[in-house]
């Protein structure tokens, strides 16, 4: 009889083993056609950069330890004495001279001879950002520099910036000279990845890497805003809180790591500060993830496990009060804790699958991808394998899988709440309102890829990207605040924070904001005043919350523009009596008969493909919380007039 296996018990172990076999097999493959750097020389004369792409300058460079040399030093009759050959990129900690390891701290020079095709192509050398300090010369010309190289801690410094330099080869054989020093970090030596290529390929590669980094930052920021908003609506479910914090840590890590576009905009940022943020997020991700896992599966995740990683985080975080020269030594011990915790996680997920917990398979998929990517980066950082950094993509896949899992969980929770507690329906409704408004802000994030095509010079372009991301984040924050306020208005618990401002300024701004939509339908917007309405210094003074009154008028005008026939006008007629402003907004379209009785009710809409019926509903809430109200008159002959009453004071 054939033996039947339970795939839930062994399938995920086999899948993980298969992933490791494939991954490490691929990592060991090399392309024999690519030029190889041996004993300080590489022949690039036959390499077509346009067709075959760029070349990583990894291999054996000439190594001159405890010397900071220039091209002129090699032209002297007595040339410097070479220490040996050194494979780049690699840390020099375990490099031995006279049988003794040189350790982390010191300075050195590296040299590489290139035989390159004599052409008119402009060549570019780029260096990925990391903790290496270097000055790189083409002959006597300084090409790349990210730090001040010195022979002591006082005369040297570190920075973390992306560098790229271009040159025109003037002869077939040229020398690259790299000076480097380290007195600030636990690992020394040229761990920087150097890539040589033509200007077109290098620029494309830089733009792609920067674009991907911005995309990851945007994804993490969106996840933070969304899941924290969900938590504030349903505080009894802390999984969304932990996941929001988890994404927030990845957001911080991404802006100080990878291509680090933050330092492109703010090059004066301290290297020590960036490294401290990097290590803090590295420490904090683990306990936050275990807390999130325990919130999802409290019966499978033991309390002692969460307490152990939390205590580890607190202990290791104490090292951050010291300079990077000290706390950078904690990297490997904490990486070991990461691996042990991941192995513990495999045991936990085994139990969740056997017990058929909700979302266990989704968690397994995301966890496996994250595990492989993190393990890859740990082994890569310790020079045990030769691959690429996978954390950004692996973490993104994990984040999306967990977002999907939480979405399923939230959906079931809302269904349960609707069945058991009718009062909780307000929160579900508020979430729908949030999603309705968030579409406008998310469009700003999506539009980043379109903005990138405008291709200005790099510094202004990076500044623009960061500004747009910040604007989108600000919009999301404002929207979350808005829907929370609407929720309180529904409950009758909202406390108005009134301030004096000019009501006319709102109308003037809305007239500009709607100019494009008015032009598309060939409409005119006219503002009229009654004879007894007198302006005070060309203004209409009122007391209230400007942001919500602006939202109210914006919703009403949006409906008026959509409902109005083309080639007509929309009139704002303003009248003031002793106590109230009365603003009549008229258009020549009529409200459909079937929604006239429910016009100001939630979800009342007709004929709009993307309409939700929340605009007029929230408008009336805002008017009433200000001590006013909204009414309407409509007919096929006269059109529609929305009357808004607001107290003068």
Image (tube, rainbow, N blue to C red):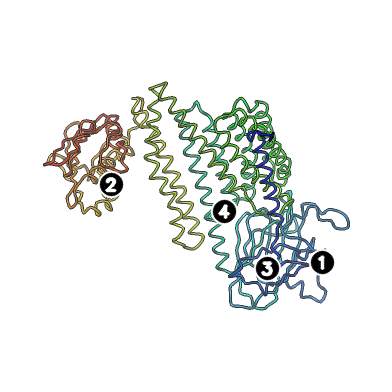
Question: Could you tell me which quadrant the C terminus lies in?
Answer: top left
**Residue at mark 1:** 82
The residues tagged by marks 4 and 3 sit, at their Cα atoms, a distance apart of: 23 Å
Residue occupying image coordinates x 53% and y 42%: 400
Q: Which mark is residue 510?
A: 2
The residues tagged by marks 3 and 1 sit, at their Cα atoms, a distance apart of: 18 Å
Residue occupying image coordinates x 51% and y 38%: 403
Relative depth, front residue between 398 and 256: 398
**Residue at mark 4:** 263
Q: Which image quadrant for residue 298?
A: top right
The residues tagged by marks 2 and 1 sit, at their Cα atoms, a distance apart of: 72 Å
Relative depth, front residue between 457 and 599: 599
Residue 103, visible in the rendered structure:
yes
The residues tagged by marks 1 and 4 sit, at their Cα atoms, a distance apart of: 35 Å
- Disc on the earlier residue, 2 or 1: 1
| Image marks 3 and 2: residues in contact by CB distance under 8 Å | no
Query: Does residue 400 lie above or below 202 as drawn?
Result: above
**Could you tell whether 423 is left or right of 253 in the image?**
left
- Secondary structure category for the residue under label 3: strand
Question: Could you tell me which quadrant the N terminus lies in?
Answer: top right
| Image marks 4 and 3: residues in contact by CB distance under 8 Å | no
**Residue at mark 3:** 137
Residue occupying image coordinates x 46% and y 58%: 452
Q: Which image quadrant for residue 313?
A: top right
- Disc on the earlier residue, 3 or 1: 1
């Amino acid at each position: 009889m054939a033996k039947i296996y339970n795939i839930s018990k062994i399938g995920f172990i086999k899948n993980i083993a298969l992933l490791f076999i494939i991954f490490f097999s691929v990592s060991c493959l090399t392309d024999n056609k690519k030029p190889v750097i041996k004993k300080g020389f590489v022949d690039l004369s036959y390499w077509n950069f346009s067709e075959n792409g760029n070349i990583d300058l990894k291999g054996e460079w000439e190594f001159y330890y405890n010397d900071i040399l220039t091209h002129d030093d090699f032209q002297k009759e007595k040339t410097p004495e070479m220490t040996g050959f050194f494979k780049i990129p690699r840390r020099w900690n375990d490099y031995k001279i006279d049988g003794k390891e040189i350790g982390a701290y010191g300075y050195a020079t590296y040299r590489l001879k290139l035989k390159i095709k004599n052409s008119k192509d402009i060549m570019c050398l780029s260096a990925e950002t990391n903790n290496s300090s270097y000055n790189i010369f083409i002959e006597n010309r300084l090409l790349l520099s990210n730090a001040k190289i010195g022979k002591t801690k006082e005369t040297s410094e570190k920075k973390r910036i992306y560098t790229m330099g271009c040159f025109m080869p003037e002869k077939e054989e040229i020398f690259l000279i790299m000076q480097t020093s380290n007195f600030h970090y636990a690992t020394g030596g040229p761990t920087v990845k150097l890539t040589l290529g033509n200007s077109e390929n290098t620029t494309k590669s830089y733009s792609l890497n920067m674009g991907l980094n911005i995309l990851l930052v945007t994804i993490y920021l969106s996840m933070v805003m969304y899941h924290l908003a969900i938590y504030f609506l349903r505080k009894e479910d802390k999984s969304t809180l932990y996941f929001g914090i988890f994404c927030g840590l990845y957001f911080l890590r991404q802006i100080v790591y990878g291509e680090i576009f933050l330092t492109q905009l703010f090059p004066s940022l301290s290297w020590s500060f960036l490294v401290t943020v990097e290590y803090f997020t590295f420490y904090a991700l683990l306990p936050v993830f275990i807390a999130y896992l325990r919130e999802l599966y409290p019966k499978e995740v033991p309390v002692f496990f969460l307490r152990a990683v939390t205590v580890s985080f607190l202990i290791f975080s104490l090292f951050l009060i010291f300079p990077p020269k000290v706390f950078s030594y904690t990297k490997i011990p904490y990486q070991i804790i990461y691996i042990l915790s991941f192995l513990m996680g495999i045991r936990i997920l085994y139990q969740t699958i056997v017990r058929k917990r909700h979302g266990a398979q989704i968690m397994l998929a995301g966890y496996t991808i994250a595990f492989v990517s993190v393990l890859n980066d740990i082994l890569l950082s310790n020079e045990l394998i030769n691959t690429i950094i996978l954390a950004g993509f692996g973490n993104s896949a994990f984040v999306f899988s967990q977002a999907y899992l939480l979405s399923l969980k939230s959906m079931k929770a809302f269904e349960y709440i609707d069945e058991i507690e009718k009062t909780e329906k307000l929160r579900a409704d508020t979430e729908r309102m949030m999603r309705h408004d968030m579409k406008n802000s998310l469009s700003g994030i999506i539009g980043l890829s379109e903005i990138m095509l405008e291709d200005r010079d790099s510094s202004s372009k990076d500044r623009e990207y960061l500004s747009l991301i910040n604007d989108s984040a600000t919009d999301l924050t404002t929207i979350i605040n808005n829907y929370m306020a609407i929720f309180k208005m529904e409950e009758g618990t909202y406390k108005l924070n009134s301030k004096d401002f000019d009501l006319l300024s709102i109308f003037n701004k809305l007239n500009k904001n709607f100019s494009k939509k008015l032009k598309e339908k060939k409409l005119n917007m006219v503002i009229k005043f009654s004879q007894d309405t007198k302006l005070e210094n060309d203004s209409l003074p009122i007391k209230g919350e400007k942001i919500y009154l602006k939202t109210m008028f914006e919703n009403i005008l949006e409906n008026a523009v959509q409902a109005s026939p083309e080639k007509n006008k929309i009139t704002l007629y303003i009248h003031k009596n002793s106590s109230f402003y009365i603003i009549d907004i008229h258009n020549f379209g009529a409200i459909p008969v079937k929604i006239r009785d429910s016009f100001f009710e939630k979800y009342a809409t007709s004929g709009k493909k993307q309409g939700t019926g929340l605009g007029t509903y929230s408008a009336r809430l805002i008017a009433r919380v200000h001590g006013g109200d909204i009414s309407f008159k409509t007919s096929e002959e006269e059109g529609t007039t929305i009357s808004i009453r607001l107290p003068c004071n």
